[in-house]
Image: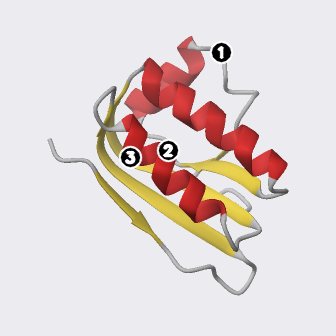
Amino acid sequence: MTTKFETSAPSSDGARVLKVTGEVDMETSPALKDHILKALKGTKILRIDLRDVGYLDSSGIAVLIGGKKEAAKAKVEYRLLDPSPQVKSVIELSQLQMFFTIESPGAPK
């Protein structure tokens, strides 16, 4: 499966969305890291849309954690948007559900 990354322009409230599609593993996690670092520039809020991620391994979790740390340094709010069931399971197994701010559809933004 091909992994794709798509970054939106900042909205009127300064938020940007990085949509991730496919699998995040040892092969694709470096590209995710690059996209997160680029997306943090010039935004107040970064949402990582994970609804279309079918697989996430420990290297992907490490990139998401690193992204949150970089966001904190840049004073950018960092949120995971609607993680797929597979991603949510990995986050819960890693006991990181309280570490990340996770937004679901219909939840206040």
Number of numbered tags placed on the structure image? 3
| Disc sitting over residue 33 in the figure | 2
Residue type, label 1: Gln
Which residue is rendered at x = 67% and y = 22% of the image? 96
Image quadrant where residue 56 sits: top left
Secondary structure, mark 3, is: helix
Residue type, label 2: Lys
Relative side of 14 to 104, left or right: right
Tell me if label 2 and label 3 are in contact, CB under 8 Å. yes
Whether residue 16 is visible: yes
Q: Closer to us: mark 1 or mark 3?
A: 3
Tell me if label 2 and label 1 are in contact, CB under 8 Å. no
Q: Mark 1 points at which residue?
A: 95
Structural crowding at the residue carrying mark 2, measured as other residues with C-alpha within 10 Å and reported as few (<14), some (14–19) or many (≥20): some
Which residue is rendered at x = 71% and y = 71% of the image? 43
Q: Mark 3 points at which residue?
A: 31
Structural crowding at the residue carrying mark 1, measured as other residues with C-alpha within 10 Å and reported as few (<14), some (14–19) or many (≥20): few
